Image: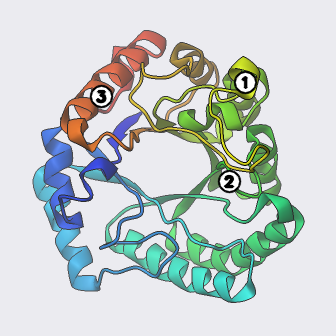
């Protein structure tokens, strides 16, 4: 099992080339590369050339940090055809970057619009038709997560679609800060992870409050009935996710993938939170899996 850090809270103060040293300083041996303006931005074509990729690969090796995954977020599910085509073009370059970094895993979101789920799914599958041959040729695995406000938000439905794609290299990501958006009462982490079983290969680790509690009045938005999706990516212990239940469920299905700390929004304490997240994650792995299971 790998324990990684998504160093997003350091993005404003560090270039992508500086991140391996930051991750190593926080005590991690693995890094997740999420969307970043000078690397692969949200909904945009990559902003790094081959020389920059080679430099990043060397910087990571010099720091003793492996890159667990590359995470693009692109509009491969539309809604528009031009957006979809642009996303596929960006995906092709992102896959090449991943290969050139020596990384064999990419993770992403379904994207699309929940109010147009049927059209979004069709666009998503159309994009995959173009990309699957490239993933397979390059030997890159794909891990998919349901995200609040995507065309699939429910974890059970996401697992079923992942299985329906019928590729052994496409798997499921369980995101703990999305717990209360992807299941029924309490988020149902055990049920979703149990349903995914061998298909769950990646976990995002952060806390959040249960927005469905107290008659849904934890957050008040105006006008009433607005279709916002509110959640946090907070340090473990600042919200209401039952991490013991999550890790017990992961242990029950024999999970042996990547656990990535992905706290956002507390840049003023980025170093302290990153270290504490590592310590808390390590304790959970040791409690539920044993001390010998973590390639930290």
| SS at mark 1 in the image | loop
CA separation, marks 1 and 3? 24 Å
Q: Which residue is mark 3?
A: 278
Looking at the image, residue 100 sits to the left or right of residue 181; the answer is left
Q: Quadrant of residue 80?
A: bottom right
Q: Earlier in the sequence, mark 2 or mark 1?
A: 2
**Location of residue 93 in the rendering, given as x and y in whole percent from the top left corner:** 46, 82
Looking at the image, residue 36 sits to the left or right of residue 57; the answer is right
Viewer-proximal residue among 28 and 272: 272
Viewer-proximal residue among 288 and 265: 265
- Residue 72 shows up from this direction: yes
Q: Earlier in the sequence, mark 2 or mark 3?
A: 2
Q: Earlier in the sequence, mark 1 or mark 3?
A: 1
Determine contact: label 2, label 3, CB under 8 Å.
Answer: no
**Location of residue 121 in the rendering, given as x and y in whole percent from the top left corner:** 81, 66
Residue 96 in the image: above or below residue 194: below
| SS at mark 2 in the image | loop
Residue 216 in the image: above or below residue 113: above
Q: Which residue is mark 1?
A: 188
Q: Residue at x 67, y 31 (%)?
A: 180
Quadrant of the frame with the N terminus: top left
Mark in the foreground, 2 or 3: 3
Q: Residue at x 67, y 62 (%)?
A: 111
**Location of residue 11 in the rendering, given as x and y in whole percent from the top left corner:** 27, 58
Determine contact: label 1, label 3, CB under 8 Å.
Answer: no
Tell me the tag on residue 28: none
């Amino acid at each position: 099992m790998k324990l990684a850090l998504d160093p997003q809270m350091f993005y404003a103060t560090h270039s992508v080339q500086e991140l391996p040293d930051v991750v190593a300083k926080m005590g991690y041996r693995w890094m997740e590369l999420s969307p970043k303006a000078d690397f692969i931005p949200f909904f945009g074509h990559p902003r790094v050339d081959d020389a920059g990729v080679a430099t990043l690969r060397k910087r990571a090796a010099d720091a003793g940090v492996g890159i667990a995954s590359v995470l693009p977020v692109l509009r491969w599910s539309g809604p528009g055809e031009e957006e979809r085509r642009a996303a596929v073009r960006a995906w092709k370059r992102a896959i090449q970057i991943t290969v050139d970094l020596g990384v064999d895993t990419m993770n992403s979101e379904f994207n699309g619009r929940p109010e147009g789920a049927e059209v979004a799914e069709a666009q998503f599958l159309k994009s995959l038709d173009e990309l699957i041959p490239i993933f397979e040729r390059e030997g890159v695995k794909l891990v998919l997560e349901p995200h609040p406000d995507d065309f699939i938000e429910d974890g059970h439905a996401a697992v079923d679609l992942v299985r329906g794609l019928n590729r052994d290299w496409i798997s499921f990501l369980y995101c703990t800060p999305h717990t209360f958006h992807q299941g029924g009462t309490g988020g149902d982490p055990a049920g979703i992870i149990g349903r995914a079983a061998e298909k769950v290969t990646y976990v995002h680790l952060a806390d959040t409050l249960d927005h469905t509690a107290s008659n849904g009045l934890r957050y008040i938005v105006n006008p009433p009935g607005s279709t916002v999706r509110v959640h946090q990516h907070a340090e473990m212990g600042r919200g209401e996710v039952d991490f013991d239940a999550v890790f017990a469920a992961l242990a029950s299905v024999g999970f042996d993938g990547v656990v990535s700390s992905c706290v956002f929004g507390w840049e003023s304490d980025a170093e302290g939170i990153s270290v504490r997240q590592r310590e808390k994650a390590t304790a959970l792995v040791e409690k539920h899996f044993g001390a010998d299971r973590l390639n930290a």
